[in-house]
Amino acid sequence: MRLDLQPWGETMAELVAAARAAESAGAGVIWAPELHRSAFTTATAMAAGTQKESGGEGRVGVGTGIALAFARSAMLTAMAAADLDELSGGRFRLGLGTGVARLNQDWHGVPFERPLPRLRDTVAIVRAVLAGGDPINHRGVRSIRVRGWRRPYPGVREHIPVYLAGVGPAMVALAGEVADGWIAHELCPPAELRDRVWPALRSGHVRRAGRTDFDVVAAACCSVDPDPAVARRRAANVVGFYASVRSYAPTFAAAGFGQVCEAAAAALKAGRPADELGGLVPDAMVDAFVIAGTPGQCADRIAAYDGLADAIKLSPPSYGLPAEETREAQERLLELVGSLR
């Protein structure tokens, strides 16, 4: 199983240094999220800051994990993907996700109606633009009509892999149907993969016609420390943050933590910051949804994903933590990844 990293940095320079350290530790792909930074800008910096081997093949893959699919035009997304694939020497992976309704409508002022067909159309348009034909036509919930345009720059590869993030079964099935890979939410324990994700991927015909190149990328916040209590405390805010988000409540309720979600939502409404709700999260809930503990304990938890995923995207805890503590957590995570390669 491939070990991927989602590097963290207080500055862009530190983030690029963390990407280099992940490369040196043997990470398979370094992923750039989109929340406080632009995923494409971050991926560009990491691609430029990591190495290429002879023949144009990079030592470490670079991906957006994930970029918001609707906040940009599909054509701009495709052009950014082509630019990044060129810059990285054919190492780029385009990860896309919908985000939630409030983020799209209130933060970015873009429609969110019918997100599943909208995402399907986005992938179709991205691929049509990357194919470079003229004209480019697609009609749907999201449409494009382009005449007299051809990208004059040669592509590094004929095909840039497209990954889709999804939590609900319909979105996961869509990834299995139209994408080259699926990326998990960072709270995705092995049981979630086995009991919910794989049935949905199969319903999307991911293994249809003998296809074996689909990349299933699990994800986990991974908090490593010689003291398991310290590791859990650092990761608790990650769980608390998502416990306050209404769309994740069914997942937590199914695991027996519905009351924690109610408490987190009430605390958020009362003005408590979303990334400082870890005090409401019991140790059992931390253990259920993230990887936290000593290096040996974390290694065992990572091993539990083997056979269920092709890769696991690991990220250090950062929610509600001072930078120096996240920095220490990331160093321990990099040491763990290096010891497992």
Image (cartoon, rainbow, N blue to C red):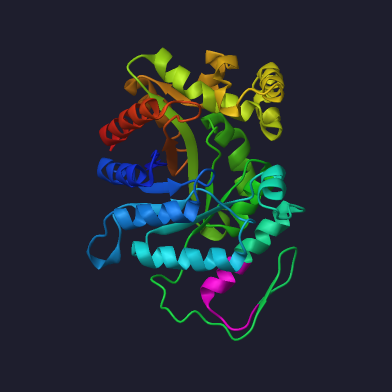
Count of all numbered marks drawn on residues in the image: 0
* Relative to 320, 21 lies left or right: left
Q: For residue 295, which quarter of the picture?
A: top left
Residue 106 to residue 71: above or below: above
In the image, the segment drawn in magenta is 125-136
Residue 164 part of the magenta-drawn span? no
Q: Is residue 229 visible?
A: yes
Across and down, in percent, residue 102 comes to 71, 43
Residue 133 part of the magenta-drawn span? yes
Residue 35 to residue 270: above or below: below
Residue sitting at 22 percent across and 64 percent down?
54
Residue sitting at 54 percent across and 15 percent down?
284
Residue 330 to residue 26: above or below: above
Q: Residue furthest right?
A: 113
Across and down, in percent, residue 256 comes to 66, 18
Q: Nearer the viewer, residue 327 or 229?
A: 327
Residue sitting at 49 percent across and 64 percent down?
80
Q: Quadrant of the N terminus?
A: top left
* Relative to 22, 135 lies left or right: right
* Relative to 10, 340 lies left or right: left
Q: Nearer the viewer, residue 311 or 54?
A: 54
Across and down, in percent, residue 313 comes to 44, 40
Q: For residue 269, which quarter of the picture?
A: top right
Residue sitting at 41 percent across and 70 percent down?
157
Across and down, in percent, residue 340 comes to 29, 34
